[in-house]
Amino acid sequence: MKMGEQSITPNKSGISNSDQSENTEHEMNSDNEDMSPEEFANLDSQLDELNSALDDIEQKNDDIHAKLLQLLHANREVRKQLKLDQEDRAVMETDSDVAKH
């Protein structure tokens, strides 16, 4: 193969990738031609609603993630404090036992 030549390999259906993309493009153009302006406006409105719903879901996901991080940090602090309290009690018990003997 010479430089600048493009290799076109058939896909599983036996249609080359470039032919397939041309067919898909033609199908899309013919689908658009078959749609009335009202249908196109309705589809556009539905896509806007879906986009808005996805934005809402993404925002809720971000909020949940932030709250989970806050909870994780708070739990770590509580565990650290509990561990320090246990260590303090152990030291006090040891000091108390030493003082008795």
Image: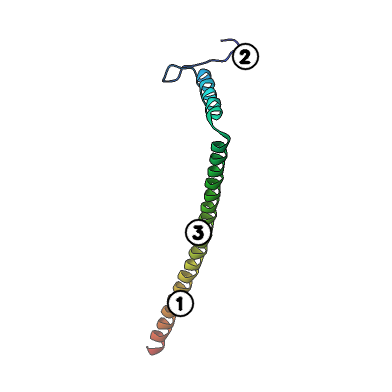
Q: Which secondary structure, mark 3?
A: helix
Which residue is drawn at the image coordinates 57% and 15% (left, top)?
A: 6
Which residue is drawn at the image coordinates 56% and 38% (left, top)?
A: 38
Q: Which secondary structure, mark 2?
A: loop
Q: Callout 3 environment at 10 Å: few (<14), some (14 to 19), or many (20+)? A: few
Q: Earlier in the sequence, mark 3 or mark 1?
A: 3
Query: For the residue marked with disc 3, what is the amino acid?
Result: Ile
Q: Nearer the viewer, residue 81 or 72?
A: 72
Residue at the spot of label 1: 85
Q: Quadrant of the C terminus?
A: bottom left
Q: Quadrant of the N terminus?
A: top right
Residue 25 spot, x, y in % from top left = 54, 24
Residue at the spot of label 3: 64
Query: For the residue marked with disc 2, what is the amino acid?
Result: Gly
The quadrant holding residue 98 is bottom left
Q: Nearer the viewer, residue 56 or 101?
A: 56
| Residue contact at pointers 2 and 1, CB within 8 angstroms | no
Which residue is drawn at the image coordinates 42% and 19% (left, top)?
A: 13
| Residue contact at pointers 3 and 1, CB within 8 angstroms | no
Q: Earlier in the sequence, mark 2 or mark 1?
A: 2
Q: Nearer the viewer, residue 81 or 60?
A: 60
Above-or-below relation of 4 to 45: above
- Distance CA(mark 2)–CA(mark 3): 52 Å
